[in-house]
Structures are given as C-alpha cells and as structure tokens.
Amino acid sequence: MGDDLPKQALAWYASTVTHADGGPAFSFGLTGRVVLVTGGVRGVGAGISSVFAEQGATVVTCARRDVEGLPYEFHPCDIRDDDAVKAMIDAIVDKHGRLDSVVNNAGGSPFVLTAESSAKFNRKIIELNLLGALSVSQHANDVMQNQPSGGSIVNICSLSGRRPSPGTGAYGAAKAGLESLTQTLGVEWGPKVRVNACVVGMVETEQSELFYGDADSIAAISKNVPLGRLATPADVGWAVAFLASDAASYISGASLEVHGGGEPPHYLATTNATSVK
C-alpha cells in the first residue's frame, strides 16, 4: 500500500497566506473582541485571522518563530511549552484586559508511514496537535471563567481524525483526540465557556501541489467533493467566526464539518454495480 501513496500526506494543515476576500457581507458582532489564533500567520490560520480582523476583532497570533510584517499582534510561542503558553496568555490579558476567543489552529504533520515513525516523532506530533491545544485551552479557560462574558474556544480538527490517515497516523489520532476533548470541555467548562470544533476537509492553498498534486490533479480531486471544489482558508475562517460569535451562543461541545459535503466512499468510483451508477 505504501508504494501507492504520495510522498506528502493528504492531511490538512496551515501552510500558506490567504485572506477573506469574497466573504459574506455581514457582521457576526465581533467588533472589539480579543481573539487568539494559534498558528494564525499562514495558511488556514491566516484565513481565520483575516476573517476575524475583517469582522472588527483584535487579532492576536502566535507561532514558534518570529514573523515580520504581520498586520496582527504577534507572540513567539511554542504551544508545546506549557510555561510559554501561560506567559503568552498572561501577556495578552495584561495588554487587553481580557481574552474573548481562542482558535486552536496550530498543528500539522509531515508524511511518515507509521512503521517508519520513531517514538520521538510520534510524541512531537501528538504534543503539537493535541496537548498544545489542551494547554492553550486550559490557560485561556482560567481567564474566561473569571470574565463576566465568559469566552469561546474553537478547535480546528480534521477529517483525518475520522477516517484512516495513512502516512499521518499520529496526526489523525491526535485530531480524533482533539475532537473528543472538545466534547468533554464543553461539559466541564460550561456555562461560562463554550468549546466547539471545526472538522476540516481538504483546503486549497498556494502549497496545495505538495499535498494534492498539480492543477489537473487538484481539479480531479475536486470532482470527488460534492460542492465541486476544495475549501479556501477563508471558508474555514467564516465557520470559526460563527462559532465564536453570539449567533452560536447555544452551541457547545459540537463539531461543525467544513468539508464541502464530505468525501464519498472510494468504491462508488470503481464499482460496476448498476444500482449505484
């Protein structure tokens, strides 16, 4: 099976800069909200940050390394380091007086077949995609529980956590864990803090060729999506903005699927059964 797989994983992760151009012309009432988007400097994360900024929110982003020229407040932070996460959350609250929403977007994985992955590699992937989001959520919750308005946390999950994820086994397992964690935190932290997930499918970015092939390959893959295209980072951003807004005030512990209708079973494309043609 491994010989038939691409050299890069077909797993979503934030990778390129995309803005919210062409988004719906309405307001979610997020003006003045303080929003932290982890990994919000590129790819899907940048799309999320752009939507919140367009909605009038104060956007704060973080990544492991400094990024120059960002239009948003930036904090260098490795979310796998719990002390660094606490320091970042404290700095945000010291500056702005509150923290209204957190989007746990940081994550990803290179392609490594499970039989070839080391214990160190697996641990780092799970720390980044699951334990880091848990750390950010815990420290954010400490702040939000003591705010009159509470707060909202949105976890960026993946279809890789719901189906086989060959080449990104630890990533898929971590994303499955993050979606499960979303439900638990929704119970533990309500009513002051709402916790939800966006379960994201295939996203088209300027690095799409690394994951989905050239333009012809992407067009062919898009035909398998019921809505006929891959998502844009802004598509994810609008879904996240909705979950963070008061329009979703009675939604917690839920998963919003952002996948264009999903991925039909592969057998439908190959079967010769007349009843499904």
Image (cartoon, grey):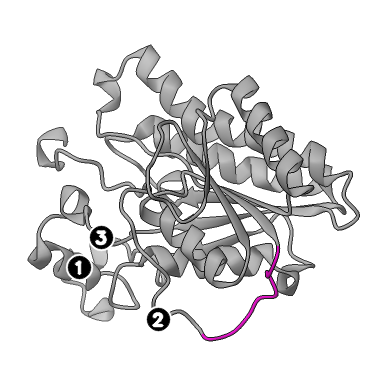
Q: Which residues are magenta?
A: 25-32
Dot placed on the residue nearer the N-terminal end, 3 or 2: 2
Q: Kindly identify which numbered label has been placed on residue 69.
A: none
Cβ atoms under marks 1 and 2 closer than 8 Å: no
Cβ atoms under marks 3 and 2 closer than 8 Å: no
Please identify the dominant SS of the magenta region: loop
Neighbour tally class for label 1: few under 14, some 14-19, many 20 plus, Cα within 10 Å? few
User: What residue is drawn where x is 84% and y is 50%?
Assistant: 190
Q: Is residue 3 magenta?
A: no
In this orientation, which residue lies closer to the viewer: 225 or 73? 73
Please state the horizontal and vertical placement of residue 108, each as a whole percent of the image: 38, 39
User: Disc 1 residue type?
Assistant: Ala
**What is the CA distance from the residue labelled 1 to the residue labelled 2?**
33 Å
Neighbour tally class for label 3: few under 14, some 14-19, many 20 plus, Cα within 10 Å? few
- Relative to 59, is 242 above or below? below
Q: Give SS at disc 1.
A: helix
Cβ atoms under marks 3 and 1 closer than 8 Å: yes
Which dot, 3 or 2, sits closer to the camera? 2
Please state the horizontal and vertical placement of residue 156, each as a whole percent of the image: 52, 50
In the drawing, does residue 142 fall left or right of residue 118? right
In the drawing, does residue 4 fall left or right of residue 232? left
Q: Which residue is mark 1?
A: 269
Neighbour tally class for label 2: few under 14, some 14-19, many 20 plus, Cα within 10 Å? few
In the drawing, does residue 215 fall left or right of residue 241? left
Q: Which residue is mark 3?
A: 266
**What is the CA distance from the residue labelled 3 to the residue labelled 1?**
6 Å
